[in-house]
């Protein structure tokens, strides 16, 4: 059987350029921040919401093609080796007198931070205690940034600390030529986020999260990279193995804000520590899009909304609990059953794979209509999405930070018309996220993340998406990308047969389509699916399923239909497309989200045909 066609090689090759490091923008606060009396404050950390950790990519990738970033996925122990250690101590913030409402500030830790003992684990075999945890300031350089008192926005923040523990000592012993110093966040490739909130006593609470990426290559000053194993002698000298092109992903989160969050009680989900779970994305409540606010007269109006609902899966790796929280790592995966050999592309060498695929959609301004297609979200392989779940609340500690590549034809054209003025990079989304257990017993993951980008002075493509025609964006123009994800664990043992059909359904693109399906939730038995799109364009045709590849049933958020297999069926199957004799793959989800029917159909990942019925507004995941 031929491999299933996917996004074109040209689009994949451009993926790294499709997500960009614009300047961020921020709205004005209702009340400007006021600096603490005397400009200096010393506050205790909230230990339950403050931790330091690492998510180490332990791989065996000796070939030079993986240099210098370790982009292969030949994991030695089934996944990342993760730990979190909760820290306690003080944070001092020194503010300088503001100039034009911008106050430079410095962060330090008088008395250092001390952490709890923890256990670093990977899914298969690897387990190593992490003890004697301390965090202390860089001895040479100061952590600092600039705070806008009107917006709360922090720019130019670099956090510089030494992280000392038994694991890093064992790593240094295994690599005696290593000359390590303090970590700098964000470093060459990472992220920092600082939020100040006004307190009643006149001081400012500070919440900070930071990550960095430390690739090790395959040699350290001529010696192979080695990692300690959990076999140590009486002098704490540990056995080690070669792990070429492995990488460290240290991260730290702390806050002085003691505002309590409500406990989840009966809605608290149960997790299996040191495991990997794959959740199914609820497509009706998962989407990427943008709230465009563009000062461009040719558009006929400043504001418009683009929405593309996303289909696929979310993979979670859960670590070992520590201090009431559970570390995790998140990855976005394509829909189950969607198999294809990726086309040759520089992205493959960079370790970037497929993620969630989105439906084609329209972006409608009063005077202009844009057709958006080939929507894809993929993980940034250099900065994994890691965090910690508060087991008493189900909330992610702090905001989740997801860094990923967004691709679609309008964004590619936007990069082209700006002719290199926009530097490449991945979108960095932040926002609240949580896990809950619903009435049917399934675990539901919710994520609502966004960012705000200053677009003034850049060019916006015309609807033709050609390089020689674009509109200049005036003062106040912003892009506001969003990433909303709802994903659910499987319900144990549904045996229901899900059936349904509809005719003359109007898609959000304006096409008319019909479908009929009969799918056993457990994938056992007779299954059928047909889909017809009456469009006269490239999406028109009929798909007839011949073999069911995968199937599953579950519930959308708030549903109670577990006894009947849930209100959502997700399946994939191979079959024929009426326009040729090649095998094709349909990926489908049908749901009844909040009482509103929704279906999305993708033939060959949407490259041959796609259809979904429109939603009236953005759904909160």
Image: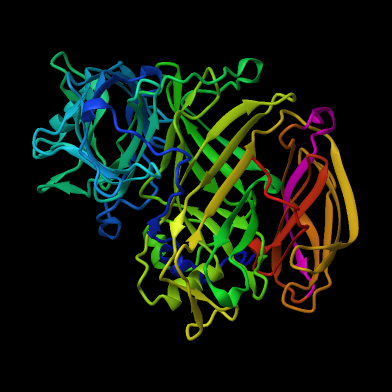
Pick whichever, 327 or 565, lies toward us: 327
Residue 167, x across and y down, in percent: 23, 26
Q: Quadrant of the N terminus?
A: bottom right
- Asked if residue 572 lies in the magenta stretch, the reply is yes
User: Does residue 368 belong to the magenta stretch?
Assistant: no
As drawn, is 311 to the left or to the right of 229?
right
Q: How is the image coloured?
A: rainbow
**x and y percent of residue 96 in the render?**
20, 38
Image spot of residue 255 (x, y percent): 36, 26
Span shown in magenta:
559-578
291 lies above or below 301: above
Q: Is residue 603 above or below residue 618?
A: below
Question: Which residue occupies the foreground of this view, 569 or 360?
Answer: 360
Instruction: Find residue 384 and report its image quarter.
Output: top left
Q: Say if 347 sits above or below 270 in the image.
A: below
Question: Can residue 158 be seen here?
Answer: no
Q: Position of residue 594 (x, y in %)?
A: 78, 39
Q: Residue furthest bottom?
A: 468
Left or right, 231 with respect to 560, comes to left
- Residue at position x 19%, y 21% from top? 112
Asked whether, in this view, residue 98 is left or right of residue 260, the answer is: left
Give me the residue at 64% from left, 33% from top: 489
Horizontally, residue 153 falls left or right of residue 479, namely left
Residue 56 shows in the view: yes
Q: Residue at x 34, y 65 (%)?
A: 423
Tell me the quadrant of the picture where the C terminus can be found.
top right
């Amino acid at each position: 059987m031929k491999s299933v066609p996917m996004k074109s090689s040209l689009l994949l090759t451009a993926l790294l350029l499709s997500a960009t490091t614009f300047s961020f923008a921020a709205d004005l606060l209702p009340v400007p921040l006021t600096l603490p009396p005397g400009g200096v404050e010393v506050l205790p950390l909230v230990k339950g919401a403050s931790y330091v950790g690492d998510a180490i990519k332990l791989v065996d990738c000796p070939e030079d093609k993986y240099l210098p970033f370790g982009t292969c996925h030949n994991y030695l122990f089934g996944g990342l080796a993760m730990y979190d250690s909760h820290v306690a101590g003080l944070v001092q913030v020194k503010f300088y007198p503001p100039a034009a409402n911008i106050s430079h500030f410095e962060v330090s830790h008088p008395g250092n931070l001390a952490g709890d003992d923890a256990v670093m684990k990977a899914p298969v075999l690897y387990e190593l205690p992490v003890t004697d945890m301390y965090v202390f300031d860089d001895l040479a350089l100061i952590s600092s940034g600039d705070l806008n008192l009107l917006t709360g926005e922090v720019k130019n923040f670099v956090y510089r600390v030494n992280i000392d523990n038994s694991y890093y000592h064992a790593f240094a012993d295994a690599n005696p030529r290593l000359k390590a110093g303090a970590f700098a966040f964000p470093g060459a490739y990472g992220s920092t986020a600082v939020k100040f909130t006004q307190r009643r006593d006149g001081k400012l609470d500070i919440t900070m999260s930071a990550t960095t990426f430390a690739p090790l290559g395959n040699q350290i000053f001529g010696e192979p990279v080695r990692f300690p194993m959990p076999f140590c002698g009486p002098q704490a000298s540990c056995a080690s193995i070669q792990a070429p092109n492995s990488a460290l992903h240290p991260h730290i989160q702390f806050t002085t804000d003691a505002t309590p969050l409500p406990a989840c009680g009966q809605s608290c989900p149960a997790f299996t520590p040191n495991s990997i779970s794959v959740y199914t994305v609820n497509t009706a409540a998962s989407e990427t899009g943008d709230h465009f606010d563009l000062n461009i007269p040719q558009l006929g109006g400043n504001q418009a909304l683009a929405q593309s609902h996303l289909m696929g899966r979310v993979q979670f790796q859960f670590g070992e609990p520590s201090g009431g929280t559970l570390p995790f790592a998140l990855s976005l995966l394509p829909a189950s059953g969607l198999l294809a050999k990726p086309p040759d592309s520089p992205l493959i060498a960079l370790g970037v794979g497929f993620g969630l695929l989105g439906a084609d959609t329209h972006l409608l301004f009063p005077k202009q209509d844009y057709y958006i297609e080939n929507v894809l979200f993929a993980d940034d392989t250099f900065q994994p999405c890691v965090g910690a779940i508060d087991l008493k609340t189900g909330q992610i500690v702090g905001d989740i930070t997801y860094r990923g590549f967004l691709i679609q034809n309008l964004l590619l054209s936007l990069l082209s018309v700006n002719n290199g003025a926009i530097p490449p990079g991945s979108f960095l989304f932040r926002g609240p996220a949580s896990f809950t257990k619903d009435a049917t017993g399934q675990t539901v993951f919710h994520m609502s993340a966004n960012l705000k980008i200053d677009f003034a002075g850049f060019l916006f493509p015309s609807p033709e998406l050609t390089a020689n025609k674009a509109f200049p964006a005036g003062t106040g123009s912003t892009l506001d990308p969003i990433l909303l994800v709802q994903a659910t664990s499987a319900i144990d043992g549904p045996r229901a047969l899900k059936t349904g059909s509809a005719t003359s359904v109007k898609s959000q693109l304006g096409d008319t389509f019909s479908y009929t399906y009969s799918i056993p939730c457990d994938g056992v038995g007779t299954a059928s699916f047909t889909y017809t799109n009456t469009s006269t364009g490239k999406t028109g045709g009929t798909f007839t399923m011949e073999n069911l590849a995968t199937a599953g049933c579950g519930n959308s958020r708030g549903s109670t239909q577990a006894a009947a297999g849930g209100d959502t069926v997700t399946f994939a199957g191979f079959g024929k497309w009426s326009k040729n004799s090649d095998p094709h793959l349909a990926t489908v989800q049908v749901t009844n989200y909040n009482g509103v029917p929704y279906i999305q159909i993708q033939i060959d990942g949407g490259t041959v045909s796609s259809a979904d019925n429109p939603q009236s507004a953005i759904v909160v995941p």
